[in-house]
């Protein structure tokens, strides 16, 4: 999982990416390609 300042670039890499908010942190998750995971730091 990558920690990024801005998740906008992480989201547009793949069309299956979704932005989720958990415990006050923002995550990008992708069911089809789990390597695309990212978290806002």
Image (cartoon, rainbow, N blue to C red):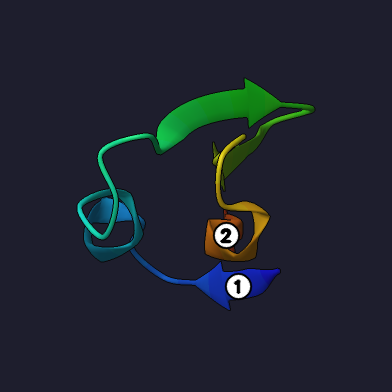
The residue mark sitting in front, 2 or 1, is 2
* Residue 3 figure quarter: bottom right
Query: Which is nearer the eye, 39 or 15?
Result: 15
Q: Against 8, is 20 above or below?
A: above
Instruction: Give 28 or 13, whichever is nearer the viewer.
Output: 13
33, above or below 41, in the image: above
Farthest-out residue, right: 23
Q: How many marks?
A: 2
Residue 11 pos. (x, y %): 30, 49
In this rendering, position of residue 9 left or right of residue 37 = left
Query: Dot 1: what SS?
Result: strand
Which is more toward the observer, 40 or 32?
32
Which one is nearer the viewer's eye here, 36 or 21? 36
Q: Which residue is mark 2?
A: 38
**Could you tell me which secondary element the residue under label 2 belongs to?**
strand
Which quarter of the image is occupied by the N terminus? bottom right
Quarter residue 10 falls in: bottom left
Image location of residue 22, percent across then percent down = 73, 26
In whole angstroms, how far apart are the C-alphas of marks 2 and 1? 6 Å
Residue at label 1? 3
């Amino acid at each position: 999982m990558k920690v990024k300042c801005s998740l906008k670039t992480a989201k547009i890499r793949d069309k299956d990416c979704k932005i989720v908010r958990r415990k006050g942190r923002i995550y990008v998750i992708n069911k089809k390609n789990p390597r695309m995971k990212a978290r806002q730091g």
